[in-house]
Amino acid sequence: MAHTDTMEKLVAELRTVMPFKKTTAKGDVVLIAAEDPHMLLYAMVTDIVRDANKRDEWWNISLTLLTVPLQKAVWTLRTEQMTGREIFTMGGKERFFQALDLSEGSSPGEQPPDDSSPPPSKALLRRVK
């Protein structure tokens, strides 16, 4: 499935500034990025249950969206989608979902940055004060 360069660039930049985990478990805080509407939000995973109605490995992920007011949702995702290995679509709009490593000493980025690559011409994330 083809994904927009914008979402791929956003995910690449997020990987440099956020301490992501390779797995997702009950109690994790996840970062969700959405194409339309453009948004980044946090959610807490309250449960993960195998979807027995599907032949392949799909999971019902119960979430509490950390918004005001709090909202509850259940997303059905494959392992690759719930662990940040795959950008996916919901309603035709791209999404990214990955758990954060909030343990003490965790640092952003899965790999050290490659010093040989040029800096991005336009940052997709900006700091709001």
Image (cartoon, grey):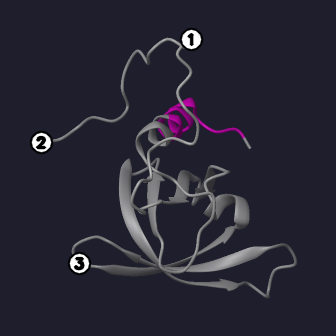
Image position, residue 75 (x, y; %): 57, 74
Question: Which residue is denoted by mark 1 in the rendering?
Answer: 116
* Residue 11 lies within the magenta run: yes
Q: CA distance from mark 2 to mark 3?
A: 23 Å
On screen, residue 39 versus residue 118, left or right, reads left
Q: Name the residue rendered at 85%, 73% in the picture.
A: 56
Image position, residue 100 (x, y; %): 47, 59
In-front residue for pair 68/111: 111
Q: Residues within 10 Å of mark 2 (few under 14, many from 20)?
A: few
The circle drawn on residue 48 is: none
Element carrying mark 2: loop
On screen, residue 71 versus residue 50, left or right, reads left
Q: How many marks?
A: 3
Question: Which residue is denoted by mark 2 in the rendering?
Answer: 129
Task: Check disc 2 and give the amino acid type.
Answer: Lys
Say if mark 1 contacts mark 2, CB within 8 Å. no
Q: Residues within 10 Å of mark 1 (few under 14, many from 20)?
A: few
Residue found at the far left of this picture: 129
Q: Which residues are magenta?
A: 2-12
Q: Residues within 10 Å of mark 3 (few under 14, many from 20)?
A: few
Image position, residue 35 (x, y; %): 47, 47
Q: CA distance from mark 1 to mark 3?
A: 44 Å
Q: Quadrant of the C terminus?
A: top left
Image position, residue 39 (x, y; %): 36, 51
* Residue 115 lies within the magenta run: no
Chief SS of the magenta region = helix
Element carrying mark 3: loop
Q: Nearer the viewer, mark 2 or mark 3?
A: 2
